[in-house]
Amino acid sequence: MSCCTEWVPLGELGEIVSGATPSTLQKQYWDGDIPWITPADLTHHEGVYFTGSLRKITEAGYKSCSTRLLPTGSILFSSRAPIGHCAVTTFPLCTNQGFKSVVPNNRLDSVYGFFALTYLKDQIIARGRGATFAEISKEIMESVQIPLVALPEQQRIAAILERADRLRRLRRYALQLSDTYLQAVFLEMFGDPVRNPKGWAVNEMARHIEGIRYGTGSPPEYVSSGIPFVRATNVKRGTVQREGLAFISAADAHKIEKCRLKAGNLILVRSGANTGDCALVPAEFDGAYAAYDLIIEAAYPYNVYFGFLINSPYGKALIQRLSRRAGQPHLNAEQAKALRFPIPPTSLIERFAGVYRSVERLRANHAEAQRQAEHLFQTLLQRAFRGEL
């Protein structure tokens, strides 16, 4: 840590402010002019500044409880359910009791404080107390120490981190746009599969695939490196993800040869929380093995078409209506074969598959750019509060 850095309690850098909720039984307390925020309002918030719309309370509601109007530039920090949602206010607002917000004094830059709390989030969560759910008290929040440098240095560090944070969000947004684009292309070419406005023949999937195999229900022993073993948790966003990937030995793989994957196969999750998620096996997983899932063998371009359709809201709704076992969705090979979909002409499906491949190559570039931007931000965040930036 830099010799010019000192660790200072938040209580010395501003006022820690709790919130409150007016009675929801009193209509005259609600639908007024005073913005009022809860931790739930920050669930999908990204970036430094909060600029969203909020529920509002009246002057009477404000006076009826102990909530406080926070000035612009305050640092919101949720103290329970959950701990750690954070944002800087861009307009005066008040909060419910789920916050321990910081109104900085002239020693603390708001944006620097925001990133300091982001950096310390896990440590603060670990200090939560409570019998029903963990909560950060005002006293705990006041005692949280952050590394403090001179105000101009805070502003320099905050500007660097803000740019890195903006970059990672832009990369994430670009990846999301590619999803939206493919959905738009699908609807333009084929129409809504629920209404089937173009009148495509509706057939069972079994008529257009080569077969369905089961992955293994008895996973081999995992090893630190070896042959990739794809589990349901790796099936995300229409493809196989490396995050959390397991590996098995060649000897164990030989025992479950029927579970071997080929590039272009579809993996369909058959049970558990993400039943119905489907992945098109990419070339890098050719020769991997599958866990307790369905392996659909379909030739191009039908593998692309069925994979995209199964992952759509329409496909998910079909699978949700299938039988349940032990209280959880459960899909078998016969049910999967019997799934009925609109089937356009092969030439049209092939055109869509070509677009899909092009977009997937673009998505791979976007995903790598996002990974790099996230790594850059996390590296800068660590360096900033270790006195190395």
Image (cartoon, helix red, strand yellow):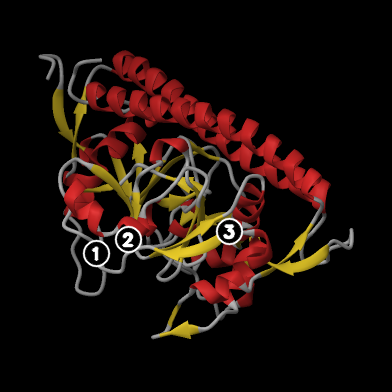
Q: Amino acid at mark 1?
A: Ala
- The reply to whether dot 1 and dot 2 touch (C-beta < 8 Å) is yes
Using the rendered image of the protein, determine whether residue 214 is visible from the camera's viewpoint.
Answer: yes
Q: Check disc 3 and report its element: helix, strand or loop.
A: loop
Identify the mark nearer the N-term, 2 or 3: 2
Query: Which image quarter: residue 243?
Result: top left
- Residue plotted at (65% across, 39% down): 356
What is the x, y in percent for residue 263? 47, 42
In the rendered view, does 232 fall on the left or right side of 46?
left
Using the rendered image of the protein, determine whether residue 31 is visible from the camera's viewpoint.
Answer: no
What is the x, y in percent for residue 88? 45, 38
Report how far apart the C-alphas of labels 2 and 3 lie in the structure.
52 Å
Q: Amino acid at mark 2?
A: Arg
Which residue lies most toward the bottom here?
326
According to the image, label 1 marks what residue? 134
Of the residues tagged 2 and 3, which is closer to the observer?
3
Q: Is residue 118 above or below residue 69?
A: above
Q: Is residue 372 above or below residue 3?
A: below
- Residue plotted at (58% across, 28% down): 362
Q: Say few, some or many: other residues with alpha carbon within 10 Å of mark 2 (under 14 / 14 to 19 / 20 or more).
A: many
The image's mark for residue 210 is: 3
The image's mark for residue 48 is: none
Q: Check disc 1 and report its element: helix, strand or loop.
A: loop
Q: Say few, some or many: other residues with alpha carbon within 10 Å of mark 3 (under 14 / 14 to 19 / 20 or more).
A: few
Q: Quadrant of the N terminus?
A: top left
Of the residues tagged 1 and 3, which is closer to the observer?
3
